[in-house]
Amino acid sequence: MNIHEYQAKQLLKRYGAPVADGVVVLDASEAEAKASTLPGPLYVVKAQIHAGGRGKGSFKEAEAGEKGGVRLAKSPQDAAEQTKAMLGNTLVTKQTGPEGKTVGRIYIEDGADIDRELYLSIVVDRGTGRVAFIASTEGGMDIEEVAESSPEKIATVTVDPKSGMTDDVANELVSALALDGPAADEGRQLMHTLYQAFTETDMAMLEVNPLIVMENGHLRVLDAKVGFDPNAEFRHADLAELRDETEEDPLELRAGKSDLSYVKLDGNIGCMVNGAGLAMATMDIIKHYGAEPANFLDVGGGATKEKVTEAFKIITSDPGVQGILVNIFGGIMRCDVIAEGVLAAVQEVGLNVPLVVRLEGTNVDKGKAIIDGSDLNVIAANDLDDAAQKIVKAVQG
């Protein structure tokens, strides 16, 4: 689960991170009054969407102007005008894709005099099985280019889970960021603060870009991006309130409510598979034969007929799907249950694209008999390789 910048900052502020004062605006008519509560005289007006690159983004609508999704204002009136220009319009960045995202919230924040921009993030390093800090003195909007052209400017420091965040680790990060004076002392404390927030709330990613050194020598978290581990959501009922469903893909949201593992992709062949490994293999072989999968969808090992029906309906709800591959290896999951679910879904929503079904394992004969006994125009496959070739051929002509 991802949250908005202002929500991430509110969370970090509760842990003691240095965050500027700010206000959230949902209605442009309230912007001037809310901005007037901030110290000023400089205000930063930020579009709130779940995507990076806002500062370099552009709006589809002409009335939004050409300044991107992060703008400076020199008065509450100016901040209100910028808010009105952005709110309700579509912001396109490198991370949104060409369709962009509609801006439904604006964050107006007290400005800062910036001396240096730094980069700091925390992720789970799957290779080492540890929490890892990533730090660079080259923070800001061009950090992706820095990673590609000057990787030596990016330092990675892992944390031993037995000892947790130590002063030695904090000092190593302060050194990597070239902090001195008051910023060095604040930096050491910040590392402990961020690590505590990351671990206690089960974050999957915490990015501060930029972390700034202000002209007065002190640190400030100027931007923050947070994502939480979905497998730990049951431990944090309070964090569930931060979810903004308007920022999520509607099909992924629908799948989550049915306990299905679904991720929408950009291809045209819908996939229904049981087991994450088999799903990955199915997507790979589709690509091998020259096509692109439209989704990752794992119905799980104990799926019911109703769950399979919903999975099939989700796949067919994607207008980009031009063919469907059902690939089931029955262990706990029974092939006859899959077959019944597919039939129920087709009877409800219809079948307007080619469908290839490969069944193997528990109750495979029953499953095939159910499919064969129906009036569905189904292409049967003997194995995964055969199934992939047949669905690609059917879709491509």
Image (cartoon, helix red, strand yellow):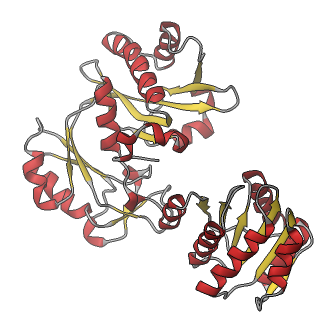
Examine the rendering and report whether any part of residue 188 can be seen.
yes
Q: In the drawing, does residue 126 fall left or right of residue 38?
A: right
As drawn, 386 above or below 283? below
Q: Quadrant of residue 87?
A: bottom left
The residue closer to the viewer here, 327 or 24, is 327
Q: Residue at x 13, y 54 (%)?
A: 31
Q: Position of residue 139 (x, y in %)?
A: 45, 33
Q: Position of residue 362 (x, y in %)?
A: 85, 62
Circle count: 0
Q: Residue at x 44, y 52 (%)?
A: 51
The residue closer to the viewer here, 117 or 224, is 224
Q: Residue at x 66, y 62 (%)?
A: 297
The residue closer to the viewer here, 324 or 231, is 231
Q: Position of residue 357 (x, y in %)?
A: 81, 75
As drawn, 89 above or below 128? below
Q: Quadrant of residue 188?
A: top left
The residue closer to the viewer here, 164 or 189, is 164
| Quadrant (top left/top right/bottom left/bottom right) for the C terminus | bottom right
Q: In the drawing, does residue 332 fall left or right of residue 303?
A: right
Q: Position of residue 271 (x, y in %)?
A: 71, 68
Examine the rendering and report whether any part of residue 393 can be seen.
no
Q: In the drawing, does residue 389 fall left or right of residue 42?
A: right
As drawn, 347 above or below 316? below
As drawn, 355 above or below 132? below
Q: In the drawing, does residue 6 fall left or right of residue 345?
A: left
